[in-house]
Image: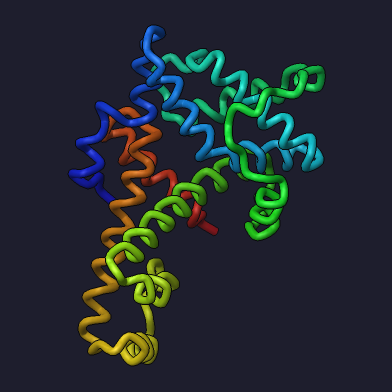
Amino acid sequence: MSPTPDSLSRFSTTCWSLVMNHDPTLPKSSEALGELCRRYWYPVYAYVRKGGCTPDEAQHVTRSFFAELLQHPLRSDSPSRPRFRDFLLERLSAFVAGDWGNLAAAEATLQAPTIDQLESQLLSENTAATPDEVFQHAFAAEVIERALERLREEARYSGHLQMYELMRPFLAIDPSPGEYNTLARELGHRQLAMIVALKRLRQRFRELVARELSDTVDSPADLLEEQRTLHGFLHPRP
């Protein structure tokens, strides 16, 4: 999967580039980091839950972690400019290993998912063996889910929501000839039109995944690497 022209043009203004090019006199980098925290709350929560915390404890630790991250966003042991996924896991591992149990409840400065939402997501996904693996899989799944949400919204706006809903199961697998016939019948189009429509939908989905990932890296090279890494997390070799 190659970066799209749209995603490549974004690197001067992505969330992570704003954070990495931090200017303490401007609020933009803090706002950008806050947006990334809101997007990737669940991977942090899943990591903490896998470490043995109760749901209430995990939500408290996650909120406290992000509050600390927003206050000190650029402290990293990495000698080079890290990708957001690596940066987040590095900081999270150090935070959980520290004396977080004595932290007072952080102010709710970020809009967080409810515990019920987080627990439902946790139960619906295949749990990995370690907290690190849970985090990596959850981060990749969150990227995919956000891209799907954008794709659905585009379909709704363009009047093709029914087509999107029927074709969504086939974004990753090919329909059988019989399933193409069913799609064509339900949507009132010829089978060839369904083949072309699915190809276009898949291409737009890949573009939206790249766009989402581009907000978490700082260069086209990092975007390519993140795309490979994401695929590996979602499709591990046996």
Give the quarter of the image for residue 148. bottom left
Q: Position of residue 16 (x, y in %)?
A: 38, 27
Q: In the figure, is residue 101 to the left or right of 191?
A: right
Who's the residue at 37% across and 88% down the image?
186
Instruction: Give the residue displayed 38% in from the left and 90% down from the top.
Output: 182
Residue 97 location, quadrant: top right
| Residue at point 56%, 30% (across, down) | 89
- Front-most of residues 138 and 193: 193
Q: Is residue 142 left or right of residue 27?
A: right
The chosen color scheme is rainbow
Residue 154, position as x, y percentages in the image: 32, 59
Location of residue 179 in the rendering, given as x and y in whole percent from the top left corner: 39, 87
Q: Residue at x 29, y 89 (%)?
A: 188
38, above or below 116, in the image:
above
In the depicted structure, whether residue 7 falls above or below residue 218: below
* 26 is higher (above) or lower (below) than 8: above
x, y percent for residue 127:
67, 53
Of all residues, the one furthest to the top in this rendering is 25
In terms of depth relative to the viewer, which is nearer, 153 or 73? 153
Which part of the image, by quadrant, shows the C terminus? bottom right
